[in-house]
Image (spheres, coloured by chain):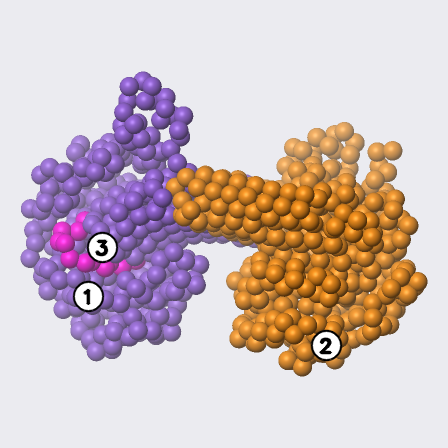
Chain colours: A orange, B purple
């Protein structure tokens, strides 16, 4: 009985990357390349209002003036931005699907394969899903149920059409198009994404979830997520990602913006499992994402939890701006790299309000020939009285050819701040392994146990369904890295 | 490139004069340093090691330079009485960047040991200087090092032959003395051969109230199983700017202690790069800064674990008052194959006012798996509970605060491996906290 879970892991590993299939759906892909016409074309295809086109063009023109940053501890092969198609629409039809019958059956199969219960299964798991494929939202479930409570959960293009005031007010308010290279690119060419609005005093009755999938070849995925939690509301939002196995690298440059108003709470969980490339480091997704939340209101709370196992290169820093007094921010992360994967991830906590608190717990696990970095910033501004931060980042090394790095920055401008940072790096202790071996647990299983125990602190923060998936992913990602 | 231009012009115009008043071994790398400086310029804040110090700002004003090596009329013994009681040292002086040639009655060094003007030793023992000079401090990597190598004409050389154990510590006092705003480029070369043991204490003082800008490059070669302690104490005034670059190379089994203490300064930017090249080497790197007013202290360290079984420990503590700015960046690199490395880094800071700022940035880069590495950094205030406890027992708040701050930095002082210096520093630190350092009796320097 005890070996049962590992048997399951082995089966999964033999499949290698389980989600590496491609789906043969008709996809409307525009020509490769990027110029103003492409930006206009995307906007036109989506039937967007003038102000949004302006926003895109401003972002595009600004992007032209930028160079790709090189400060990260990553080796990134040159990316040819003209060799990417910036829009791929698997729904093909000019208008979005009106009901399930209109959705391409192949597409439904795809999502079933991914284990996304798009239809009746949804009712059982009680989760509202917005599925985004090649950056176009294909289907949102449970919309009506949510609507009764006044919750808006739809694709961002729909939100632009139906709730333009909200989108106009908050789009780009947390991550401006001038924020960084990839934010500018995304602002220019974003094709879709999810939009969530939780009205005042509403506690969202179910977990909201988005599944992202890159399907078409040579396309980039540029989705945009905007979450607004109005006063006294609560929402838990999940995000999962997969991509087919391809030899070329695929670019994923998304933006997630979260606005948390007075006494509201947002919990954002990610299980990132983009295709990491094969054992020789060929192919895989470049995951360059800008995620940021603004705890604007008093007593607001934002919590990021991420389990990063996929992507050839991960480069992201889910961040929090603690603007409101007594705001609370949390960041829990497990980043696993194996083979030739690279990750430079961490968080930024910007304390602006009084009595703000933030917690950072980051666990890095490197195996194979991978490089895993934690990079974080804690800034306490002049007026942020009594700010409190606790950071802990631990690294576990499995193998002599991998690297684990930590680059924390602390900028303290207020004397009442208490900021602590701790980091440790080590390998799995011989004693622990020996102890397990003695009790008849072979080395590979023992490492699985120890790693799971090590990451438990973070995984416990995930919602139940995700926690199970994350634990399996951890075991799969590290399979074969021992020895 | 505005700040750089005046120095490029100066060097082009006076290169012959600079070389004439220096020695051949020091002149040799000048041309390359100049080319590197032209290419690099002064470091900008975009470079990670200079993130918190704007270098070109400090080099922009006009400074006098003693390129012609005129003797500066000063008798250090007359002005310097700030010695360490009960500590018997071999005492030497450097005035600005020139080694002071007065007779040194206390300086009785064992045979074989060389301690003297870098320029003179470069003339008498050219092979020694040529072998080591400019080999650790790479001019193509750092604009300040290139600048110093371009202009440095003299400095100090310390050579301890194989298996020689120096009982007495050597004390070197740097005195800044000038009537106009002055730029000083000092160079120190330290060679401790295998099995040798030595201790060096360097104190920085500024005599005059003019603006001083000093650059200093120290290269230290520590041989197998050698033991070397280097203490640097800065006690200058608010209008001095100091850029110090320290490079240490350690062979197998060597043990080095580096302790940099900043008691009083204007702007200080220290860096220490330690390479643990041989297995079993150990380095202890400590630092302490007490800063108030507009003082700024920026320490950056880089420890390169190249070999296996090495140990590095770092401890840095800052107390910042008024509008003082403190920065600490510590990087530890563990290279592939440097197994069984043990590395610890601690940085603790107290900000006493709202305007005081602290930036801290501990970094670990690890490419080996059998390692034990950790770092910790904190920024905070004095413990309210402890303050309350002392007040309950009749100690005034002011006194209680002093006691706590004193205890806080004491940890760094306790790493010193010289008892007399420890006692002296306890006293100096206490005075510093009481704001009485300027009342130091019988001394013309510590004004």
Tag 1 and tag 3 share a subunit: yes
Q: Main secondary structure of the magenta part?
A: strand
The residue stretch that appears in magenta:
B204-218
Q: Is residue B210 magenta?
A: yes
| Residue B35 appears in the picture as rendered | yes
Estimate the spatial distance between the alpha carbons at disc 3 and disc 2, rounded to whole Å: 62 Å
Q: Residue B63 carries which label?
A: 1
Q: Is residue B332 magenta?
A: no
Report the number of numbered marks: 3
Task: Say which element carries label 1.
Answer: loop
Estimate the spatial distance between the alpha carbons at disc 1 and disc 3, rounded to whole Å: 12 Å
Q: Which mark is residue A343?
A: none
Q: Where in the figure is residue A346, as x and y percent of width and height?
A: 58, 51
Q: Considering the image in quadrants, where does the N terminus of chain A appear?
A: top right
- Quarter of the view holding residue A345: bottom right
Task: Say which element carries label 3.
Answer: strand
The residue indicated by pointer 3 is B240
Of the pair B285 and A236, the residue shown nearer to us: A236
The residue indicated by pointer 2 is A44
């Amino acid at each position: 009985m005890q070996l049962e879970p590992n048997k399951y892991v082995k089966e999964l590993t033999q499949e290698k990357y389980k989600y590496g299939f491609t789906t043969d759906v008709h996809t409307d892909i525009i020509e490769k390349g990027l110029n103003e016409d492409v930006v206009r074309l995307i906007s036109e295809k989506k039937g967007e209002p003038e102000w949004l086109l302006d926003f895109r063009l401003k972002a595009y023109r600004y992007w032209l003036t930028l160079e790709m940053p090189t400060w990260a501890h990553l080796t990134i092969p040159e990316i040819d931005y003209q060799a990417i198609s910036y829009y791929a629409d698997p729904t093909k039809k000019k208008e979005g699907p009106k009901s399930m019958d209109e959705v391409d059956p192949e597409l439904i199969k795809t999502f079933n394969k991914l284990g996304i219960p798009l239809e009746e299964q949804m009712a059982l798991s009680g989760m509202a899903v917005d599925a985004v494929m090649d950056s176009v939202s294909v289907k949102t479930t449970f919309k009506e149920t949510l609507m009764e409570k006044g919750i808006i959960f739809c694709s961002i293009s729909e939100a632009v059409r139906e709730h333009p005031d909200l989108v106009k007010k908050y789009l780009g308010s947390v991550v401006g198009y001038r924020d960084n290279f990839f934010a500018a690119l995304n602002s220019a060419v974003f094709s879709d994404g999810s939009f969530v609005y939780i009205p005042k005093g509403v506690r969202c009755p179910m977990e909201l979830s988005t599944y992202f999938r890159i399907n078409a070849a040579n396309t980039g995925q540029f989705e945009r997520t905007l979450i607004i939690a109005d006063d006294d509301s609560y929402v838990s939002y999940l995000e999962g990602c997969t991509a087919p196995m391809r030899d070329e690298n695929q670019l994923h440059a998304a933006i997630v913006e979260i606005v948390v108003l007075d006494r509201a709470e947002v919990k954002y969980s990610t299980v990132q499992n983009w295709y990491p490339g094969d054992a020789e480091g060929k192919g895989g997704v470049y995951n360059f994402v800008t995620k940021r939340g603004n705890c604007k209101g008093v007593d607001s709370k934002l919590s990021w939890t991420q389990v990063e196992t996929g992507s050839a290169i991960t480069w992201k820093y889910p961040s929090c701006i603690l603007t409101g007094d007594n705001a609370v921010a949390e960041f829990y992360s497990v980043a696993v790299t194996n083979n030739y994967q690279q990750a430079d991830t961490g968080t930024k906590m910007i304390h602006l309000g009084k009595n703000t608190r933030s917690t950072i717990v980051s666990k890095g696990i490197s195996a194979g020939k991978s490089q895993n970095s934690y990079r974080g910033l804690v800034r306490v501004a002049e007026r942020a009285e009594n700010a409190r931060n606790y950071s802990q980042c631990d690294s576990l090394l499995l193998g002599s050819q991998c690297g684990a790095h930590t680059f924390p920055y602390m900028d303290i401008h207020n004397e009442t701040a208490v900021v602590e940072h701790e980091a440790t790096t080590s390998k799995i202790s011989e004693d622990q392994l020996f102890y397990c071996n003695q009790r008849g647990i072979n080395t590979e299983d023992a490492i699985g146990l120890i790693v799971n125990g090590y990451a438990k602190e973070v995984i416990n923060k995930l919602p139940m369904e995700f926690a199970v998936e994350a634990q399996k992913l951890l075991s799969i990602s590290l399979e074969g890295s021992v020895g | 490139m505005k700040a750089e231009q005046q120095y490029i012009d100066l060097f082009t115009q006076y290169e012959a004069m600079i070389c004439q008043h220096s020695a051949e071994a020091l002149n040799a790398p000048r041309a390359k340093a100049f080319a590197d400086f032209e290419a690099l310029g002064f470091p900008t804040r975009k470079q990670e090691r200079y993130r918190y110090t704007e270098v070109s700002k400090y080099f922009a004003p006009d400074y006098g330079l003693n390129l012609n090596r005129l003797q500066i009329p000063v008798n250090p013994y007359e002005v310097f009485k700030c010695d360490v009681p009960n500590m018997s040292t071999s005492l030497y002086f450097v005035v600005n960047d020139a080694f002071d040639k007065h007779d040194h009655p206390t300086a009785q060094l064992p045979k074989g040991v060389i301690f003297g003007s870098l320029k003179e030793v470069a003339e008498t023992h050219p092979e020694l200087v040529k072998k080591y000079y400019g080999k650790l401090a790479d001019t193509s990597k750092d604009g300040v090092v290139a600048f110093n190598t371009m202009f440095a004409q003299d400095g100090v050389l310390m050579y301890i032959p194989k298996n020689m154990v120096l009982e007495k510590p050597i004390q070197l006092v740097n005195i800044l003395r000038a009537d106009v705003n002055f730029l000083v480029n000092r160079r120190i070369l330290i060679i401790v051969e295998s099995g040798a043991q030595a201790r060096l204490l360097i104190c920085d003082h500024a005599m005059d109230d003019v603006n001083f800008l000093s650059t200093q490059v120290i290269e230290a070669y520590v041989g197998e199983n050698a033991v070397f302690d280097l203490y640097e104490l800065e006690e200058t005034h608010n209008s001095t700017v100091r850029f110090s670059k320290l490079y240490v190379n350690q062979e197998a089994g060597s043990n080095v202690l580096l302790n940099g203490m900043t008691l009083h300064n204007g702007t200080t930017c220290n860096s220490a790069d330690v390479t643990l090249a041989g297995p079993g080497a150990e380095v202890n790197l400590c630092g302490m800064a007490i800063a108030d007013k507009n003082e700024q202290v920026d320490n950056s360290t880089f420890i390169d674990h190249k070999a296996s079984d090495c140990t590095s420990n770092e401890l840095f503590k800052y107390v910042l008052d008024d509008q003082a700015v403190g920065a600490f960046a510590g990087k530890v690199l563990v290279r592939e194959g440097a197994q069984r490395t043990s590395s610890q880094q601690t940085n603790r800071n107290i900000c006493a006012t709202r305007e005081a700022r602290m930036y801290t940035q501990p970094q670990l880069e690890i490419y080996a798996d059998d390692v034990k590495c950790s770092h910790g950094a904190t920024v905070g205030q004095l413990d309210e509970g402890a303050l309350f406890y002392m007040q309950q027992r009749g100690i005034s708040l002011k006194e209680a605060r002093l006691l706590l701050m004193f205890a806080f930095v004491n940890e760094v002082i306790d790493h010193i491996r010289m008892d007399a210096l420890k006692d002296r520093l306890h006293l100096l630190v206490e005075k510093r906290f009481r704001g009485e350092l300027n009342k130091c009796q019988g001394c013309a320097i510590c004004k």
